[in-house]
Image (spheres, helix red, strand yellow):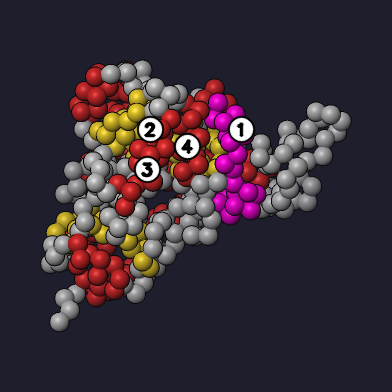
């Protein structure tokens, strides 16, 4: 495939040529752990053992690299496995990193409770404040700056291009978690990032039926280090998981268009609802990152967070009253989800600088009929006698 092909075309064809043997238009599931060698070291297509490489996984990786405009993509068994492998490959004990002040709770747990014991220190910085980032970069040597945009769950927006300039001037590398946006809405490598990470469980897979992760990089040398660590530690997806993710990617563009349209209508309704104190959605002109999001994103995404005037218990009750919004963790599937971040996905950040408001509700707006979704939210927020 040519990188000049449109995104929608790449999603369906990149890494997915018809099978040479049968002509099958869908890549086969190579459900094999090992591969016959033609003499010692005589590998067919470079495959020897599926922890190292598998043809189904290769198809997914080639597709993801094309969609993110990267040189190499590597697929993993989960988003956290992808993050961990990238950090182990790129960092060493004694390195110092900067992380967002509203990062995903699982990412924070990895930094604070796993990597800290390995001798990697971190500092929390508001990544949307480039001046604050520059100050932290000047204070001491920094190996890596880790960011999300939009962030999880407060949906802050980071100017990737401006952040990349600041990070590179300080001699550090920039990693962007692009899970919330997906490569359809935003391509951080083209804006200056060095690496992109995904939980492919979310929008890329898109159907809440597979767990996976990915790292996409611009520098092939960095990719080699990650691939070595991946093979050494083994956090790889099975062939069927890779195939399911690849199947989901084919419809990413059409799904994201619907997610974004529905989320905008949900955000607009919530912004006018008397029970709502604040709506966090970059598509609203009142959002502080709205202009930056307009400049670096195709649309504003399917995630909406909001706070209730009545406080934490009201938020918990509302999460339990919905009919179509399923109470559950995760996001990015075709079905709508609702959750209470402080008690669910971000419970690991309680008591830290990343603690989220207790009155916050996070929505993953699905692709159902939007009028039905609006009615469901209205009844969930209605006053009860």
Q: Nearer the viewer, mark 3 or mark 2?
A: 2
**Residue at the extreme bottom of the image, as rendered:** 385
* Of pointers 4 and 2, the one earlier in the residue sequence: 4
Residue bounds of the magenta highlight: 225-250
Mark found first going from the N terminus, 1 or 2: 2
* Residue under pointer 3: 109
Q: How far separated are the C-alphas under marks 4 and 2?
A: 13 Å
Is residue 39 among what the camera can see? yes
Q: Position of residue 72 (x, y in %)?
A: 55, 32
- Tell me which label, 4 or 1, sits earlier in the chain: 4
- Residue at disc 1, secondary structure: helix
Numbered-mark total: 4
Residue where numbered disc 1 is placed: 232
- Residue occupied by mark 2: 116
Q: Is residue 289 left or right of residue 235?
A: left
Secondary structure of residue under mark 3: helix
- The reply to whether residue 192 is in sight is no
Marks 1 and 2, how far apart in space?
A: 21 Å
* Mark 3 vs mark 4: in front: 3
Q: Position of residue 191 (x, y in %)?
A: 37, 31
Disc 4, SS:
helix
Earlier in the chain: of badge 3 and badge 2, it is: 3
Alpha carbon separation for disc pair 4 and 1? 13 Å
Residue at 80% over, 28% down: 41
């Amino acid at each position: 495939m040519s990188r000049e092909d449109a995104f929608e075309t790449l999603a369906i064809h990149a890494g997915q040529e018809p099978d040479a043997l049968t002509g099958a238009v869908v890549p086969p599931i190579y459900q094999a752990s090992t591969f016959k060698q033609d003499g010692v070291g005589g590998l067919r297509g470079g495959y020897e053992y599926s922890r190292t490489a598998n043809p189904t996984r290769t198809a997914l990786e080639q597709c993801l690299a094309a969609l993110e405009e990267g040189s190499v993509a590597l697929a993993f068994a989960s988003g956290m496995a992808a993050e961990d492998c990238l950090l182990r490959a790129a960092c060493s004990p004694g390195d110092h990193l900067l992380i967002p002040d509203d990062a995903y709770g699982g990412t924070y747990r990895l930094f604070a409770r796993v990597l800290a014991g390995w001798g990697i220190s971190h500092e929390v910085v508001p990544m949307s404040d480039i001046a604050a980032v520059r100050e932290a970069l000047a204070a001491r040597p920094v190996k890596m700056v880790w960011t999300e945009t939009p962030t999880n769950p407060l949906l802050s927006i980071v100017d990737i291009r401006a952040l990349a300039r600041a990070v590179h001037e300080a001699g550090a590398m920039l990693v962007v978690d692009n899970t919330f946006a997906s490569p359809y809405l935003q391509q951080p490598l083209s804006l200056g990032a060095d690496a992109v990470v995904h939980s492919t469980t979310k929008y890329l897979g898109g159907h809440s039926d597979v767990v996976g992760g990915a790292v996409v990089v611009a520098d092939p040398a960095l990719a080699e280090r990650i691939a070595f660590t991946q093979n050494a530690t083994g956090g790889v997806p099975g062939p069927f998981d890779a195939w399911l993710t690849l199947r989901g990617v084919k419809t990413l563009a059409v799904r994201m268009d619907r997610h974004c349209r529905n989320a905008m209508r949900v955000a607009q309704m919530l912004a006018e609802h008397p029970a709502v104190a604040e709506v966090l959605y970059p598509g609203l002109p009142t959002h502080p990152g709205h202009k930056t999001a307009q400049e670096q994103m195709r649309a504003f995404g399917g995630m909406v967070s909001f706070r209730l005037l009545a406080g934490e218990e009201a938020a918990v009750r509302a999460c339990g009253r919905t009919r179509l919004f399923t109470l559950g963790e995760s996001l990015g599937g075709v079905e709508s989800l609702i959750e209470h971040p402080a008690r669910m996905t971000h419970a690991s950040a309680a008591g830290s600088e990343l603690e989220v408001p207790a009155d916050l509700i996070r929505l993953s707006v699905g692709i159902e009929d939007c009028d039905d979704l609006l009615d469901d939210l209205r009844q969930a927020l209605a006053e009860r006698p």
